[in-house]
Amino acid sequence: MTQTTFIWDFDGTLVESYEAIREVLILLYKSYDLPFDEDWVMDYIIKESVGSLLRKLAAKYHLSFDEMLDFFNREQEVRDYMISLMPYAKEVLQETKEKGVRHFIYTHKGATTQSVLERLGIDRFFTEVITSANGFARKPHPQGIRYLVDKYDLDKSQVYYIGDRRLDAEAAANAGVQSINLHQPNSAVNRKIETLKDLLLLEEL
Protein backbone atom coordinates (compact mmCIF):
# COMPACT_ATOMS: atom_id res chain seq x y z
CA MET A 1 0.00 0.00 0.00
CA THR A 2 1.35 3.43 -0.97
CA GLN A 3 2.16 5.66 2.00
CA THR A 4 0.06 8.79 2.49
CA THR A 5 2.08 11.99 2.94
CA PHE A 6 1.03 15.30 4.49
CA ILE A 7 3.09 18.39 3.66
CA TRP A 8 2.02 21.19 5.98
CA ASP A 9 1.99 24.94 5.73
CA PHE A 10 2.83 26.51 9.11
CA ASP A 11 1.26 29.88 10.00
CA GLY A 12 -2.52 29.67 10.13
CA THR A 13 -2.51 25.93 9.45
CA LEU A 14 -0.49 24.08 12.09
CA VAL A 15 -0.12 27.05 14.40
CA GLU A 16 -2.07 30.15 15.37
CA SER A 17 0.25 33.07 14.73
CA TYR A 18 -1.98 35.82 13.37
CA GLU A 19 -1.88 37.94 16.52
CA ALA A 20 1.90 38.09 16.24
CA ILE A 21 1.61 38.83 12.52
CA ARG A 22 -0.92 41.59 13.25
CA GLU A 23 1.49 43.25 15.70
CA VAL A 24 4.32 43.10 13.18
CA LEU A 25 2.20 44.58 10.39
CA ILE A 26 1.07 47.44 12.62
CA LEU A 27 4.71 48.15 13.38
CA LEU A 28 5.73 47.87 9.73
CA TYR A 29 3.06 50.30 8.54
CA LYS A 30 4.02 52.71 11.31
CA SER A 31 7.75 52.44 10.55
CA TYR A 32 7.17 53.15 6.86
CA ASP A 33 4.56 55.84 7.65
CA LEU A 34 1.86 54.11 5.61
CA PRO A 35 -1.90 54.40 6.10
CA PHE A 36 -3.11 51.30 7.96
CA ASP A 37 -6.60 49.82 7.53
CA GLU A 38 -6.38 46.90 9.92
CA ASP A 39 -9.56 45.10 8.82
CA TRP A 40 -8.56 45.24 5.16
CA VAL A 41 -4.96 44.23 5.82
CA MET A 42 -5.82 41.21 7.97
CA ASP A 43 -8.51 40.08 5.56
CA TYR A 44 -6.08 40.40 2.68
CA ILE A 45 -3.27 38.35 4.24
CA ILE A 46 -5.70 35.57 5.17
CA LYS A 47 -7.06 35.42 1.64
CA GLU A 48 -3.71 36.00 -0.07
CA SER A 49 -0.44 36.20 1.89
CA VAL A 50 1.89 38.58 3.69
CA GLY A 51 4.28 38.34 0.75
CA SER A 52 1.58 39.45 -1.65
CA LEU A 53 0.69 42.37 0.64
CA LEU A 54 4.30 43.52 0.83
CA ARG A 55 4.66 43.33 -2.95
CA LYS A 56 1.58 45.55 -3.33
CA LEU A 57 3.00 48.06 -0.85
CA ALA A 58 6.40 48.02 -2.54
CA ALA A 59 4.86 48.71 -5.94
CA LYS A 60 2.42 51.36 -4.72
CA TYR A 61 4.83 53.34 -2.56
CA HIS A 62 8.08 52.63 -4.46
CA LEU A 63 9.63 50.74 -1.56
CA SER A 64 11.98 47.77 -1.42
CA PHE A 65 10.09 44.48 -1.14
CA ASP A 66 13.20 42.69 0.15
CA GLU A 67 13.77 45.27 2.88
CA MET A 68 10.15 45.08 4.03
CA LEU A 69 10.24 41.28 3.98
CA ASP A 70 13.43 41.29 6.07
CA PHE A 71 11.76 43.72 8.51
CA PHE A 72 8.68 41.50 8.74
CA ASN A 73 10.62 38.26 9.24
CA ARG A 74 12.90 39.79 11.86
CA GLU A 75 10.04 41.23 13.89
CA GLN A 76 7.94 38.09 13.55
CA GLU A 77 10.74 35.92 14.92
CA VAL A 78 10.96 38.18 17.98
CA ARG A 79 7.32 37.25 18.63
CA ASP A 80 7.67 33.48 18.22
CA TYR A 81 6.70 33.10 21.88
CA MET A 82 3.16 34.21 20.92
CA ILE A 83 2.63 31.23 18.59
CA SER A 84 0.33 28.42 19.77
CA LEU A 85 -0.97 25.21 18.23
CA MET A 86 -4.11 25.22 16.11
CA PRO A 87 -7.00 23.20 17.58
CA TYR A 88 -6.53 19.43 17.13
CA ALA A 89 -3.05 19.84 15.59
CA LYS A 90 -1.19 17.55 18.00
CA GLU A 91 -4.00 15.01 18.08
CA VAL A 92 -4.11 14.80 14.29
CA LEU A 93 -0.34 14.52 13.98
CA GLN A 94 -0.26 11.72 16.54
CA GLU A 95 -3.16 9.71 15.13
CA THR A 96 -2.15 10.03 11.50
CA LYS A 97 1.47 9.12 12.24
CA GLU A 98 0.26 6.01 14.05
CA LYS A 99 -1.63 5.12 10.84
CA GLY A 100 1.56 5.44 8.81
CA VAL A 101 1.22 8.97 7.44
CA ARG A 102 4.53 10.73 6.83
CA HIS A 103 4.70 14.43 7.73
CA PHE A 104 6.73 17.34 6.33
CA ILE A 105 6.51 21.14 6.58
CA TYR A 106 6.97 23.64 3.78
CA THR A 107 6.61 27.24 5.00
CA HIS A 108 7.69 30.79 4.23
CA LYS A 109 8.59 31.23 7.89
CA GLY A 110 12.32 31.35 8.62
CA ALA A 111 14.90 29.26 10.45
CA THR A 112 13.25 29.72 13.87
CA THR A 113 10.44 27.38 12.75
CA GLN A 114 12.30 24.41 14.23
CA SER A 115 12.62 26.00 17.67
CA VAL A 116 8.89 26.81 17.67
CA LEU A 117 8.08 23.19 16.79
CA GLU A 118 10.27 22.04 19.67
CA ARG A 119 8.65 24.44 22.13
CA LEU A 120 5.20 23.26 21.09
CA GLY A 121 6.24 19.62 21.41
CA ILE A 122 5.52 18.53 17.83
CA ASP A 123 8.97 18.54 16.20
CA ARG A 124 9.21 14.75 16.44
CA PHE A 125 6.41 14.24 13.95
CA PHE A 126 8.21 15.73 10.94
CA THR A 127 10.68 14.00 8.65
CA GLU A 128 11.93 17.32 7.24
CA VAL A 129 11.05 21.00 7.70
CA ILE A 130 11.51 23.34 4.73
CA THR A 131 11.60 27.07 5.57
CA SER A 132 12.54 30.28 3.79
CA ALA A 133 16.11 29.61 4.96
CA ASN A 134 16.28 26.82 2.36
CA GLY A 135 16.06 29.43 -0.37
CA PHE A 136 13.30 27.92 -2.49
CA ALA A 137 11.03 30.14 -4.59
CA ARG A 138 8.06 31.47 -2.67
CA LYS A 139 4.66 29.85 -3.07
CA PRO A 140 2.69 29.42 -5.27
CA HIS A 141 5.86 28.26 -7.02
CA PRO A 142 5.98 24.48 -6.48
CA GLN A 143 9.76 24.22 -6.00
CA GLY A 144 9.68 23.34 -2.29
CA ILE A 145 6.99 20.69 -2.71
CA ARG A 146 8.74 19.20 -5.73
CA TYR A 147 11.98 19.01 -3.76
CA LEU A 148 10.31 16.88 -1.09
CA VAL A 149 8.53 14.69 -3.66
CA ASP A 150 11.79 14.03 -5.50
CA LYS A 151 14.03 13.60 -2.43
CA TYR A 152 11.74 11.10 -0.73
CA ASP A 153 10.38 9.49 -3.92
CA LEU A 154 6.82 10.29 -2.88
CA ASP A 155 3.79 9.05 -4.81
CA LYS A 156 2.16 12.35 -5.81
CA SER A 157 -1.27 10.73 -5.91
CA GLN A 158 -0.94 10.19 -2.15
CA VAL A 159 0.58 13.57 -1.26
CA TYR A 160 -1.56 16.32 0.30
CA TYR A 161 -0.42 19.89 0.83
CA ILE A 162 -2.36 21.30 3.80
CA GLY A 163 -2.75 25.07 4.02
CA ASP A 164 -5.05 27.97 4.74
CA ARG A 165 -4.67 30.38 1.81
CA ARG A 166 -5.15 30.45 -1.93
CA LEU A 167 -1.44 30.37 -2.67
CA ASP A 168 -1.21 27.10 -0.73
CA ALA A 169 -3.83 25.49 -2.97
CA GLU A 170 -2.11 26.96 -6.03
CA ALA A 171 1.28 25.63 -4.92
CA ALA A 172 -0.20 22.15 -4.54
CA ALA A 173 -1.83 22.32 -7.97
CA ASN A 174 1.39 23.57 -9.54
CA ALA A 175 3.28 20.66 -7.97
CA GLY A 176 0.73 18.11 -9.13
CA VAL A 177 -0.32 17.05 -5.63
CA GLN A 178 -3.64 17.24 -3.80
CA SER A 179 -4.68 20.27 -1.77
CA ILE A 180 -6.48 20.44 1.56
CA ASN A 181 -7.31 23.91 2.81
CA LEU A 182 -8.95 25.50 5.84
CA HIS A 183 -10.40 28.45 3.90
CA GLN A 184 -10.41 27.81 0.16
CA PRO A 185 -13.61 26.28 -1.28
CA ASN A 186 -13.96 22.79 -2.65
CA SER A 187 -12.83 22.52 -6.24
CA ALA A 188 -11.32 20.08 -8.70
CA VAL A 189 -7.92 20.67 -7.08
CA ASN A 190 -8.80 21.38 -3.43
CA ARG A 191 -10.71 19.87 -0.54
CA LYS A 192 -11.96 22.29 2.12
CA ILE A 193 -11.91 21.31 5.79
CA GLU A 194 -13.45 23.13 8.74
CA THR A 195 -10.86 22.07 11.32
CA LEU A 196 -7.73 19.93 11.29
CA LYS A 197 -9.75 17.15 12.91
CA ASP A 198 -11.44 16.62 9.55
CA LEU A 199 -8.14 15.17 8.32
CA LEU A 200 -8.87 12.05 10.38
CA LEU A 201 -11.87 11.39 8.14
CA LEU A 202 -9.93 11.09 4.90
CA GLU A 203 -10.93 7.78 3.36
CA GLU A 204 -7.37 7.19 2.20
CA LEU A 205 -6.03 6.93 5.77
Image: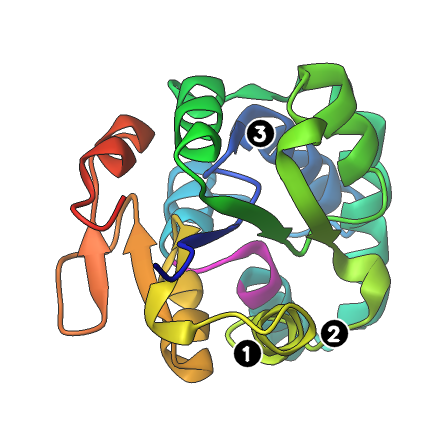
Above or below 43: residue 200: above
Identify the residue at image location x=45%, y=28%. Answer: 98
Residue under numbered circle 1: 142
One can see residue 72 in this view = yes
Residue 105 in the image: state x and y as whole percent: 61, 49
Tag 2–tag 3 contact (CB < 8 Å): no
**Left or right of 177, for residue 52:** right
Instruction: In this rendered view, identify the residue nearer to me: 195 or 75.
Output: 195
Residue under numbered circle 2: 136
Magenta run includes residue 47 = no
Q: Secondary structure at mark 3?
A: loop
Q: Secondary structure at mark 2?
A: loop
Q: Which badge, 2 or 3, comes first in the chain's sequence?
A: 3
| Gap in angstroms between the C-alphas marked 1 and 2 | 9 Å
Which mark identifies residue 17? 3
Q: Which badge, 1 or 3, comes first in the chain's sequence?
A: 3
Q: Secondary structure at mark 1?
A: loop
Instruction: In this rendered view, identify the residue nearer to me: 52 or 192.
Output: 192
| Gap in angstroms between the C-alphas marked 2 and 3 | 22 Å
- The three-letter amino acid code for the residue at tag 1 is Pro
